[in-house]
Image: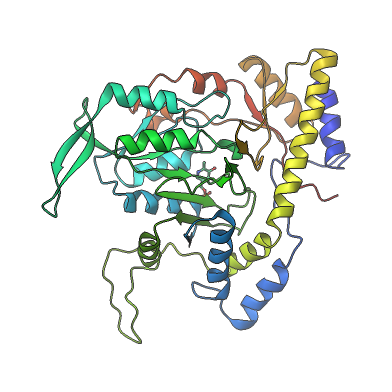
Amino acid sequence: MYKDLVKFIRELYNEPEAFIPLHAPVFQGNEKEYLNNCIDSTFVSSVGKYVDKFEEMVAEYTGAKKAIVTVNGTNALHLALLVAGVKPGHEVITQPLTFIATANAIAYTRAKPVFIDVDNDTMGLSPKALKEWLEKNVKLETKNTEQGTQSKSPINQLTNKPVSACIPMHTFGHPCRIDEIVEICNEYNIPIVEDAAESLGSTFKGKHTGTFGKLGILSFNGNKTLTTGGGGMILTNDEELGIHIKHLTTQAKVPHPWEYMHDHVGYNYRMPNINAALGVAQMERIEEIIKNKRQTAQHYKEYLNSIQTFSHSNIQFFTEPGNARSNYWLNAVLLNDKEQRNEFLKYTNEKGIMTRPIWRLMNKLEMFKNAQTGNLDNAEWLEDRVVNLPSSLRIK
Ligand SMILES: *Cc1c(COP(=O)(O)O)cnc(C)c1O
């Protein structure tokens, strides 16, 4: 059975012998031309036309009012949390089933993560589990603000600390139930920072992921759907906030013909023009890229469904959730249990097909082992069973 799947993947990628990676970048557009432009014009660094152009293209494509490029997705998350108001000692809710960057970004702010379960059918934060945890632990308390007014803050009754952000993540490009999550977080005055690092091109009820909350982030790392080498983006519908974020990513330098004047502790988080040049070339082909990825998913789905019917296979394809269009960044399958998962990983990797298990849960890692968690039944169930299959664009 695994042998047939290996054969199928080799045919899918038209690759009879060589190693097949999980997700390799493909450059088939104007990448070389734009990179040459950067070199010829000497604009290779933090100023240049591709930076502005890339931001405009992603803003238009996602429907976000503002899109601000960053050096990578991890520092996009870090800065998004800071502007959302996360401070040392605060708490930030996220899912335990995510890439380490989500939890690390929380740690950079000196806040503490709280891990809440995911849904089995989306692998993203579960609105039901979120609501249960909030109802049990968090109360809105009236506080005096620095401006002398009063506001209602969500305070964790166990720790007496404010819960100052929630980071839902759209796992492997599959949108989570973000509308319900937004509704719940609004009730509790908790700003949302959507980790849409994996979900460029994925929509929920027709709206692009990363644009539902106060802030959202994207990643353009080498293994993501669209790559700029390394890179990230912060999305927001709050125009003023967007302008402020841009300012913070550029060392908070106040424009002046010659003076060095800075009005905040800023960051050198802006993406260089050469990376943005790759981004522009790839955004020109984004529809084609998403179509190609969705077709690959369709092939996997049909094949895996057919072997399920005929040979009672226990490899189940993970399809996009209802109400959602997924970019199928990484195709995923569910195995019966951990033992079978390990067998499958061993077999496929030995055959030169790169497959990978889903991440270890964040609360099981040394750095986050003392974090508060809710009940994590679904995350634990998925942790033992999910495996990613090769998902690069198919060009042959
Ligand atoms: C890739 C990724 C990031 C961070 O992206 P980098 O650009 O690699 O820093 C953050 N969160 C998730 C879920 C990711 O998959």
Percent of width and height locating residue 291: 74, 47
What's the residue at 82%, 29% (across, down)? 6
Viewport quadrant of the N terminus: top right
Viewer-proximal residue among 139 and 32: 139
- Numbered-mark total: 0
Q: For the view shown, which residue lies furthest in the top direction?
A: 312
What's the residue at 56%, 54% (across, down)? 62
Q: For the view shown, which residue lies furthest in the bottom direction?
A: 257
Relative side of 118 to 279, left or right: left
Residue 101 visible here: yes
Percent of width and height locating residue 212: 46, 45
What's the residue at 64%, 64% (across, down)? 278
Percent of width and height locating residue 30: 72, 68
Percent of width and height locating residue 360: 51, 28
Could you say which quadrant of the image residue 104 lies in?
A: top left
> In this rendering, is residue 30 above or below 256?
above
> In this rendering, is residue 95 above or below 259?
above
Relative side of 2 to 271, left or right: right
What's the residue at 72%, 69% (across, down)? 32
Residue 392 visible here: no
